[in-house]
Image: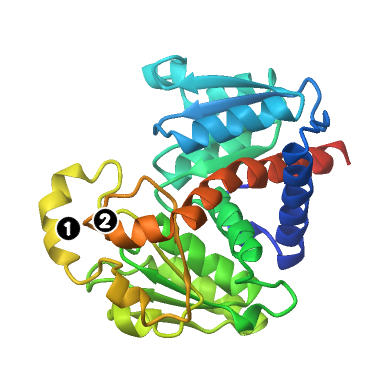
């Protein structure tokens, strides 16, 4: 049985299989063909951390695959009233076929998976956001900014906080072999363990991964520019300090002009005037909202892929 807890557990070939499935199912969806790949499967969706895109994409996705989504917040189940996580995992996984969890700590996700009898998907933790990277990768391919056969032709620039999105980009680059420059303010660099793993993978894939403090150097001749909010959920008390510390890291038209006619990606929600200007956001709205839609299709590909592993 396979879980999808973070990208470190996956190979380049496995990621390609998931992405290819996502494209196949997206094509069918656009033609209004809904094949029951997961007929009568039950997906438990546990939200300790709220979300718009994760909720809608997983629930619509499992429904379109012939299954059913069960929404569970920490207010609705014993998990929020002190029941040990391992007991919740033992109970829920005996009643459903797959579980998606969106939570704060990676360790909570991993503990749940340890005791689960069914595949567990990471819908986001503070450490990483792997399902978002599947959608981002699909979008890069659609806009002809990435090719599995020639990954080193692609350079991605990430500008902003060294958070779960930066971590996910680092691991994906290391695994697939595209070049990545991560520019963060001093004191907001990515986790050392993630950095080490990304560079370890890069030695094999041929990726060139750089960690910088200068957005202009990161964006220079990049094919893809991406960012994320400066103030994630749970960091509201740090808002004023973060806004001050991140001055100079807003993605503006002047910064984008340094790129190689790059597409711009944002996992949303976006706060115009902070991490990205209104002008850049609206100029690249097609890419951003296609990326958001691809959460649905990439996650359907992932669920079907995990379902196949379960059946095997």
Would residue 298 be seen by someone viewing this image from the given angle?
yes
Q: Residue at x 50, y 54 (%)?
A: 286
Q: Residue at x 45, y 85 (%)?
A: 221
Circle 2 packing at 10 Å, graded few (<14), some (14-19), many (20+), is many
Distance Cα–Cα, label 1 vs label 2: 7 Å
Q: Quadrant of residue 81?
A: top left
Query: In the rendered view, would you say 195 is above or below 274?
Result: below
In percent of width and height, residue 126 lies at 39, 48
In percent of width and height, residue 165 lies at 43, 58
- Report the quarter where the N terminus lies: top right
Count of picture labels: 2
Would residue 1 be seen by someone viewing this image from the given angle?
no
Q: Which mark is residue 55?
A: none
Which residue corresponds to mark 2?
230
Query: In the rendered view, would you say 97 is above or below 275?
Result: above
Residue 112 relative to residue 251: left or right:
right
In percent of width and height, residue 33 lies at 81, 33
Q: Earlier in the sequence, mark 1 or mark 2?
A: 2
Q: Quadrant of residue 90?
A: top right
- Report the quarter where the C terminus lies: top right
Residue 101 relative to residue 306: left or right:
left
Label 1 element class = helix
Q: Which mark is residue 242?
A: 1
Check contact, mark 1 vs mark 2: CB within 8 A. yes
Query: In the rendered view, would you say 29 is above or below 86?
Result: below
In percent of width and height, residue 154 lies at 58, 78
Q: Residue at x 28, y 79 (%)?
A: 213
Q: Nearer the viewer, residue 23 or 119?
A: 23
């Amino acid at each position: 049985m396979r879980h999808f807890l973070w990208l470190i557990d996956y190979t380049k070939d496995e990621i390609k299989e998931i992405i290819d499935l996502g494209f196949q199912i997206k094509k069918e969806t656009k033609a209004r063909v809904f094949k029951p790949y997961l007929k009568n499967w039950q997906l438990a969706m546990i939200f300790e951390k709220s979300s718009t895109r994760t909720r809608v994409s997983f629930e619509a996705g499992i429904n379109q695959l012939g299954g059913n989504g069960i929404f569970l917040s920490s207010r609705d189940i014993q998990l929020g009233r002190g029941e040990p996580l391992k007991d919740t995992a033992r109970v829920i996984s005996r009643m459903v076929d797959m579980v998606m969890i969106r939570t704060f700590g990676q360790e909570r996700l991993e503990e749940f998976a340890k005791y689960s009898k069914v595949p567990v998907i990471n819908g986001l933790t503070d450490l990483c956001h792997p399902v978002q990277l599947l959608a981002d990768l699909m979008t890069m391919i659609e806009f002809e900014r990435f090719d599995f056969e020639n990954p080193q032709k692609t350079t991605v620039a990430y500008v902003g906080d060294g958070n779960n999105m930066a971590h996910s980009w680092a691991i994906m680059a290391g695994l697939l072999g595209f070049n990545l420059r991560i520019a963060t303010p001093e004191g907001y660099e990515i986790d050392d363990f993630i950095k080490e793993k990304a560079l370890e993978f890069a030695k094999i894939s041929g990726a060139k991964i750089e960690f910088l403090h200068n957005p202009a150097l990161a964006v220079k001749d990049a094919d893809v520019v991406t960012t994320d909010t400066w103030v994630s959920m749970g960091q509201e008390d740090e808002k004023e300090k973060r806004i001050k510390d991140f001055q100079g890291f807003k993605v503006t038209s002047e910064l984008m002009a340094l790129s190689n006619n790059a597409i711009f990606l944002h996992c949303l929600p976006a706060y115009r005037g902070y991490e990205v200007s209104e002008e850049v956001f609206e100029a690249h709205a097609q890419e951003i909202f296609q990326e958001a839609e691809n959460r649905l299709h990439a996650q359907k590909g992932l669920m079907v892929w995990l379902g196949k592993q379960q059946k095997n």
